[in-house]
Amino acid sequence: MKKAINVILGLCAVVLLYLCYESIMQPIQFNKEKDIREAAVKARLIQIKDAEEQYRQQHQGEFCDTLDVLINFIKTAQIPHVTKVGELSDKQMESGLTESKAAAIVNSGDAAAIAANGLQNFRRDTTWTPMAEAIVGTNGNADSLKFIPYSDGQTFELEKTIHVGRSGVTQNVMECRAPYSAYLKGLSEREIYNLTDAAEKQGRYAGLKIGDLMTPNNNAGNWE
């Protein structure tokens, strides 16, 4: 009987050691996997941010609030790149020359006008790059941008609005979000609950996002 009791006590000790080990290692393993997943989510949010900035430039300052529309824009639009050679002097600018006027004179090919304005070494050449190549790379898949990594197919939440400041000045703003519950799916529910609860108590978004519908922030990430 004594031997049996010792065996049982020994097994209980092993179980307790295992539980203690798990209680220590679970948060460590959770945070390690969380960091890996958040790196992937951040990278995709930055791609969406870059696409939104280009969309705004080509749509009178407005952002896009539909992922499918934004993806179609990425697939079909092009980004201008201007190669600059030479700079306008103070004297040239005082005479009324601007970048656009100087470029127009050079592009006209009028040698006399070019010489008269001192633009022999001034050039502005514009080339166009496919948007998809700039955002997702040559071999990237633009269609995948709307999906939150590690979420089993859940999509980012995308919104836009017009922010009205205290002075009455309006500004177009956008926000793109990925909640903890999506990209941490499959990990410890207790740890996800703790993260979410802490964020909500501190008035923070429970997840990762770029932009802000309430406060213009130049589409910064909430991890920055």
Image: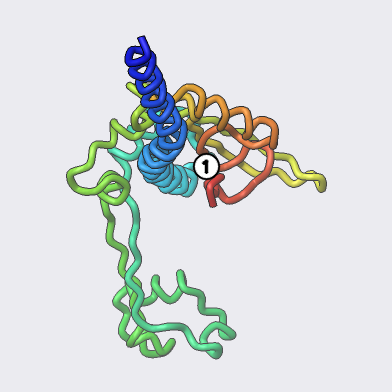
Q: Quadrant of the N terminus?
A: top left
Residue at the top extreme of this rendering: 1
Q: Residues within 10 Å of mark 1 (few under 14, many from 20)?
A: many
Amino acid carrying label 1: it is: Ile
> Which residue shows up at 24% across the image and 37% down it?
141
> Which residue shows up at 65% across the image and 46% down it?
216
Q: Is residue 51 visible?
A: no
Q: Nearer the viewer, residue 212 or 57?
A: 212
Number of numbered discs present?
Answer: 1
Q: Is residue 71 visible?
A: yes
> Which residue shows up at 38% across the image and 14% down it?
5
- For label 1, the residue is 210
Q: Is residue 202 above or below residue 94?
A: above
Describe residue 63's horizontal placement relative to residue 10 as left or right: right
Query: Mark 1: which secondary structure?
Result: strand
Return the x and y of residue 156 as percentages of the image width and height. Answer: 44, 29
> Which residue shows up at 49% across the image and 30% down it?
180
Q: Quadrant of residue 12?
A: top left
